[in-house]
Image: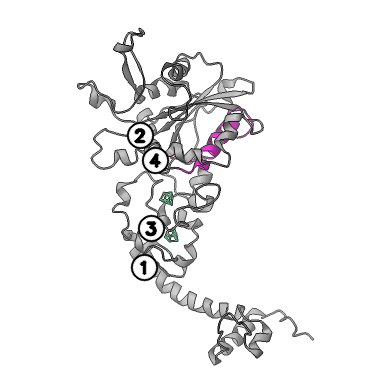
Amino acid sequence: MVQTPEQPSTPTIPGLRKTLAGIDKKYTEVHAFWLAGMSCDGCTIGVSGATKPSVEALLTGSLPGLPKIILHHPVLAVEAGHDFTHWFYKAWKGELDAPYVLILEGSVPDESLNTNNGGYFSGLGAETKDGSHDPWAEQPVPVATWISRLAPGAAASIAVGTCATWGGIPSAFGNPTGAMGLMDFLGKDYRGVLGLPVINIPGCSPLGDNITETIAVVLMFLQGLGPLPEFDELGRPAWLFRETVHRGCTRAGYYEEGTFAREYGDRECLVEVGCWGPIVQCNIVSRGAINSVGGCMKAGGICIGCTMPGFPDKFSPFYKEPPGAKFSGAISRMNGTMVSTLRRLSQRQANLTERWKKTGVPSGWGEVSSMSPLDKVYSFFYEKMQFWGGTKPGSGR
Ligand code: SF4
Ligand code: SF4
């Protein structure tokens, strides 16, 4: 059963180890092999914007207790060719003197579709079939092959972004490459050396902070410095993906009062112009896109469900009101119209000092109309309720 946001989420993981391979030592270095499958490199751009913690902090080992990460990344590496890929071979052959984690960006294509045409969908490096060093006989190595080689020996395998987690856009309807997520490719029984199934950090692109924070807590676990963080039944970090984006949305108050945007640029709730936030598990608005700033609705955009396994097909056509919103929006509008009317009356009272009730508002910025008879009646009963059983300030003298 898929975890719902309300449920506590600590799945039982058979075979989970307390620390890496039972080795009683702290590591000063850990290698991270970043592979890119069917990818737009957006996750790389996403992670480079992380600030809590930053990529720099992970690479320099400046977080107390955590090992320094030696990153092998096809876009960010200074080395090229065999100087770059020989580290991948060392990891595969078990020749590294430190543990490693495998990180995948982009979905895994089904390379068996290329069996008869000699082609490939995504690759990293090149090698000859017989292991000789004849550059003219080398063929690209599919990323799927690298995953099969490296995943079994990885302390943990981490899928980054919606393509790597669930398949994402490359696996949308039609899916000519047979694209799939890392979990689909490795299977239900896969476990890394730490005993963990695939860890999934979805998003298109994912929040950089979600990536670096998850890597940091996995490294803490690897060092024996902390418990296994909480993951839900789809392998998502539960503390990041438990809540819906709607619950943390800066526009949720408008939804509650049944006030909806008619077009982009309006400040109200965007559900009627296509926002799927009420059902989508994502923390971008509460956390901020970069350095705690921004996020889809804060920037005026709707939620298109990019963190969800059903993305993109289940959320298309984009920019159209979700079917469920017709029902929930109508209820919210009915309820909200009454509630917001009463709130505006209370708010009007809260914007008046006691003095202004008698003298009128002496503001040169705008005309504030004096209290109407209805305001006075409302104020009278409101205050009666407010101070029922208590004492109104000043009334004791
Ligand atoms: S804009 Fe979307 S996430 Fe925000 S309150 Fe409206 S429906 Fe919820
Ligand atoms: S709010 Fe929606 S569209 Fe924006 S990042 Fe989160 S899941 Fe994706």
Q: Which residue is mark 2?
A: 107
Q: Which residue is mark 3?
A: 275
Q: Which residue is mark 1?
A: 262
Q: Measured along the vertical axis of the image, is residue 256 above or below residue 347?
A: above
Question: How would you rate the neighbour count of disc 4 (Cα within 10 Å): few for under 14, some for 14-19, many for 20 or more?
Answer: many
**Could you give the CA–CA distance between mark 3 and mark 4, rounded to whole angstroms?**
19 Å
Asked if the beta carbon under badge 3 is closer than 8 A to the nearest atom of ligand 1, the reply is yes
Q: Secondary structure at mark 2?
A: loop
**Could you give the CA–CA distance between mark 4 and mark 1, rounded to whole angstroms?**
30 Å
At a point 54% along the width and 80% down the height, the residue shown is 345
Q: At which x and y percent is residue 397?
A: 79, 86
Q: Amino acid at mark 3?
A: Cys
40 horizontally vs 212: left or right: left
At a point 34% along the width and 33% down the height, the residue shown is 38
Q: Secondary structure at mark 1?
A: loop
**Could you give the CA–CA distance between mark 3 and mark 1, rounded to whole angstroms?**
12 Å
